[in-house]
Image: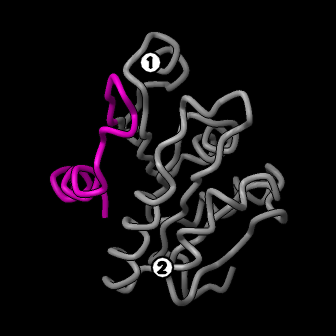
Amino acid sequence: LNEEYNNKFILLIPGVSLSGKKKQWNPTYFAEIANYYENKNYKICVVGTKDDYSSVEPILHQCKNIINAIDSSPPNVIYSIARKSSLVITNDTGPGHVASLSGAKILWILNDNNISKANIKNDNNQFKIFSSEINKISSKQVINFIKKNNLL
């Protein structure tokens, strides 16, 4: 990543494994978040495998100048990008857990259940939005949460 983006970009992790589809927040909502913050002069970066392309596609369509690391983001790259990010927004997914190891501010979009609650550690850089149905969390709720908690 270019040095100019070190303090002004957001890492989005919209994909999940095939077995984790119940944990996936709607990719269109990720795109709405990406578009909102791109218009506030944040650079948006997406990571994942080639299997995550359909999850990233709405973001690619809504944003003009994205850092697209799909299919070129093994764990060490995710970790490095997360360390430079102003904020990481993710589902409960492996790459999100890798990003959390970086110490970056992370906003988790989660199902309100014991598994999700147990999987995400509690520390000052881990923020969580829960719902009994993950896709009932709107992009507006996420933006308001980010503002309320001064995450950016």
Name which quarter of the figure residue 52 lies in: bottom right
Which residue is nearer to you in this view: 142 or 2? 142
Could you tell me which secondary element the residue under label 1 belongs to?
helix
Q: Position of residue 3 (x, y in %)?
A: 62, 85
From this view, report whether residue 35 is shown above or below residue 145.
Answer: below
Q: Looking at the image, is mark 2 or mark 1 earlier in the sequence? A: 2
Q: Quadrant of the N terminus?
A: bottom right
Is 102 contained in the magenta span? Answer: no
Could you tell me which secondary element the residue under label 2 belongs to?
helix
Name which quarter of the figure residue 24 lies in: top right
What residue did someone put label 1 on? Answer: 117
| For residue 140, side relative to residue 75 (left or right) | left
Q: Position of residue 80 (x, y in %)?
A: 70, 60
Q: Position of residue 120 (x, y in %)?
A: 50, 26
Which amino acid type is shown beneath numbered disc 1?
Lys
Q: Which residues are magenta?
A: 129-152
User: Pointer 1: residues within 10 angstroms few (<14), some, or many (20+)?
Assistant: some
Label of residue 20 in the image: none
Q: In the displayed image of the protein, which residue is found farthest to the top?
A: 114
Label of residue 62 in the image: 2
From this view, report whether residue 23 is shown above or below residue 44.
Answer: above
* Residue located 33% across and 22% down the image: 132
Q: Are marks 2 and 1 in contact (CB under 8 Å)?
A: no
